[in-house]
Image (cartoon, rainbow, N blue to C red):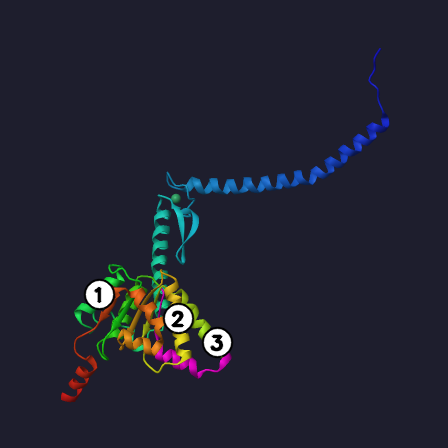
Amino acid sequence: MDSPTFDIETFEVQKQALRDALSSLRPDQRRINFLQQGVDRLQAQADAIQATRPPGCWCLGAGGRGMRYLGESLGFREYCACEAGAAAKLAHEREATAAAARKVETNLIESGIPFRALQYEIGTSPADAKAREAASKWCRGAIDSQAMLLTGDTGRGKTGLAVGMLHHCIRAGSRGLFVNVPDQLARMRDVAGGQRDEALATLRKRIATDPLVVFDDIGVGRWSEWVEETVYSWVNARYEDPDLASVFTTNCSVAELGEHIGARSTWRIVEMCGPQGIVKLGGRNLRMTAAAKVVSA
Ligand SMILES: [Zn+2]
């Protein structure tokens, strides 16, 4: 009769191997049980809350699911149709509006617009009507040029109009920078070597990235090699990225501008502006008019 052969030694080895496998499994099983208890506990809590929620609510009172950033504040990807959902949506919208307003304020403070000019707007600018209209159109994208050059004699309201344009864009949520070119150059000249490089690099970084930069009073002051190189590095940074918009104001004609800041910068400015982007401000000399009022009062 056939009986199964039995090798006791092999049996012992196999039994030990199984014991080892079991002992290595047992802690896992405990962990699985522990985790399962946690899951069950959470589900029981969720069920208890769900029992108190109105029909159709899936948010357990949170208002929605899928947290996401809305600009600088948080919101849900999906809102529940229940009251908690409506409340969360309203709160998130209010927070987003407040965050946008805070961002505009920060951008205004960091824009470098002189304090006395912080209230300037295109609409209330004393510049002539034709220039105001061109400025307004350009800000709305109705004039297709990368830059705008506001020329005209002293006191025609060029700076005020340029600040108004910057204001308009910052209020619309953009970042922007005001640079009074002669002041900035003088300030840079006055600081010592290492600090000057650092200050120039910081300014250069903003000039290379801010969506709108106003270069006020460009072409004032004497030409020097350093002035030409510095101004060129700024103008060229704008020129190289067609998405960066610029406004230049100057008392000079295009020919005179070349004598003050060099031909390379001048031609880049002219090319960025195109024929539509060069606006000559006429009208009365506003400073003289104001002075006359003071004298005759
Ligand atoms: Zn709900």
User: Does residue 179 appear left or right of residue 66 in this picture?
Assistant: left
Q: Name the quarter where the N terminus is drawn.
A: top right
Residue that badge 3 annotates: 197
Mark 3 and mark 1: Cα distance apart in space: 37 Å
Return the x and y of residue 121 as percentages of the image width and height: 24, 69
Residue type highlighted by circle 3: Asp
Q: Residues within 10 Å of mark 2 (few under 14, many from 20)?
A: some
Q: Nearer the viewer, residue 132 or 124?
A: 132
Q: Which residues are magenta?
A: 175-194
* Residue 218 in view here: no
Q: Is residue 180 a member of the stretch shown in magenta?
A: yes
Residue that badge 1 annotates: 134
Q: Nearer the viewer, mark 3 or mark 2?
A: 2
Return the x and y of residue 61 as percentages of the image width and height: 41, 46
**Sequence-first disc among 3 and 2:** 3
Residue that badge 2 annotates: 234
**Sequence-first disc among 2 and 1:** 1
Q: Residue at left 41%, top 68%?
A: 206
The quadrant of the rendered image in which ligand 1 is seen is top left
Return the x and y of residue 281 as percentages of the image width and height: 21, 73
Mark 3 and mark 2: Cα distance apart in space: 14 Å
**Labelled disc at residue 245:** none
